[in-house]
Image: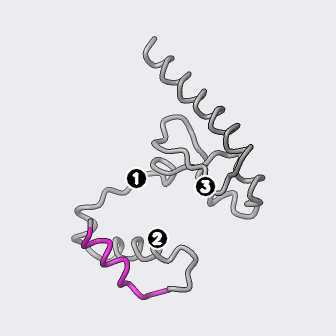
Amino acid sequence: TLRLLDLIWNYDNDLEYGTWEQHALNELVQNCRILQKIILLANRPGEFNSFPVERIPLLGFYKLKKQINSWVEGDFICHFAGIRSPDLEKLIEVYLAKVTNNSSASRLS
């Protein structure tokens, strides 16, 4: 992991790119066969890092709606980045209930 982080940090292509480190990782994985063998890529980006759909209007991301990975049942993480109180607490309650209900339903079946 430390070697990979060093590669990303020292990758100086497209530093003006807003999420330069993610861009660097994407390019490194696409262009390096060794990395392709050791890094597992999810089939769907939201599988490991998705956002509550309610985040779009709260943060004004209407133009980016297609780029926002909205949370669906089974996703590993629901990322509440940029959402502040009192909206944050409300959304945590909503998504905790969704996860709890889904978990209980799967134990019953």
Q: Which residue is mark 1?
A: 42
Quadrant the C terminus occupies? top left
Q: Nearer the viewer, residue 101 or 33?
A: 101
Q: Amino acid at mark 3?
A: Ala
User: In 3D space, how far apart are the residues under numbered discs 3 and 1 (Cα atoms)?
Assistant: 21 Å
Marks 2/1 in contact by CB < 8 Å: the verdict is: no
Q: Which residue is mark 3?
A: 81
Q: Which residues are magenta?
A: 2-14
Secondary structure under tag 2 reads helix
Is 24 on the left or on the right of 95, as rendered?
left
Please name the residue shown 45% across and 49% down the image. Answer: 48
Prevailing SS of the magenta stretch: helix
User: In 3D space, how far apart are the residues under numbered discs 3 and 2 (Cα atoms)?
Assistant: 16 Å
Quadrant the N terminus occupies? bottom left
Q: Mark 1 Cα within 10 Å, few/some/many (few <14, many 20+)? A: few
Query: If you read the primary sequence from the N terminus, does the residue marked by circle 3 or circle 2 appear first?
Result: 2
Q: Mark 2 Cα within 10 Å, few/some/many (few <14, many 20+)? A: few
Please name the residue shown 70% across and 51% down the image. Answer: 84
Work out whether 92 lies above or below 32.
above
Please name the residue shown 55% across and 81% down the image. Answer: 17
Give the number of the mark in front: 3 or 1.
Answer: 3
What percent of the width, then of the height, locates residue 49?
A: 50, 51
Please name the residue shown 29% across and 61% down the image. Answer: 39
User: In 3D space, how far apart are the residues under numbered discs 2 and 1 (Cα atoms)?
Assistant: 15 Å
Q: Amino acid at mark 1?
A: Ala
Q: Which residue is mark 2?
A: 22
What percent of the width, then of the height, locates residue 94?
A: 66, 32
Q: Nearer the viewer, residue 16 or 42?
A: 16
> Picture quarter containing residue 32?
bottom left
